[in-house]
Amino acid sequence: MTLIIYDITNDRLRTRLADYLKSRGLKRIQKSAFIGPLTDSERKEIAAKIYKMIKGQKANVQIFPLTWASYKHRLILGIPTVEEEEESPIL
Amino acid sequence: MTLIIYDITNDRLRTRLADYLKSRGLKRIQKSAFIGPLTDSERKEIAAKIYKMIKGQKANVQIFPLTWASYKHRLILGIPTVEEEEESPIL
């Protein structure tokens, strides 16, 4: 699994990144966090694309490769803050 | 390592949570993301505290236990979006 979190000031760029991550099959878990299963090469490809997308912008994106155990043992507190349609199972 | 990400609408609550995570020795890596070494019992204690803090609020907090490898292999793209003083080494 791969977790991608971002901190982007510009609304348009933020939306563009979110749309891109959705298009790559990642699932939104928070307003600025996506998760999904990616191969190493997919992760590198996505990182390269994001690098180009945010270049020169006030933006920070962090990409964490996660073990399955890390994913399964995550604790979720509070209520969902993203759309229900995006809460479909990953596998 | 433990990664904590949050999505909180209320400014005051968001600041309160950030201050709490700082007080527990976690390092801010984005506006809504903190990371740091925690034992299992510390992680549970912090989760219980956050649970109480955000109860009934429009808030979502996710806590990921990370392997050291996940932490070391994270990719960081773009520029830092949090204060330099918080960029001190964790260990």
Image: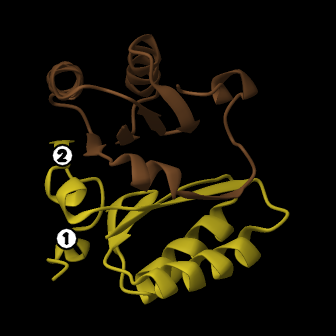
Chain colours: A brown, B yellow
Q: Is residue A17 above or below residue A64?
A: above
Q: Is residue A9 visible?
A: yes
The amino acid type of the residue labelled 2 equals: Ile
Numbered circle sitting on residue B87: 1
Q: Is residue B36 above or below residue B24?
A: above
Q: Is residue B78 visible?
A: no
Mark 1 closeness class: few <14, some 14–19, many ≥20 residues within 10 Å = few
Going by the picture, which residue comes out furthest to the top? A23
SS type, badge 1: helix
Q: How many marks?
A: 2
Q: Residue at x 52, y 25 (%)?
A: A91
Left/right of residue B62 with respect to residue A19 in the rendered view: right
Q: Residue at x 22, y 59 (%)?
A: B71
Q: Residue at x 67, y 79 (%)?
A: B48
Label 2 lies in what chain? B
Residue A33 percent location from the top left of the image: 47, 40
CB atoms of marks 2 and 1 within 8 Å = no
Q: Is residue B49 above or below residue A8?
A: below
Q: Dot 2 corresponds to which residue?
A: B76
Residue B44 percent location from the top left of the image: 57, 80
Q: For the residues carrying marks 2 and 1, which lies nearer the camera in this image?
A: 2
Residue A14 percent location from the top left of the image: 42, 28
Mark 2 closeness class: few <14, some 14–19, many ≥20 residues within 10 Å = some
The amino acid type of the residue labelled 1 equals: Glu
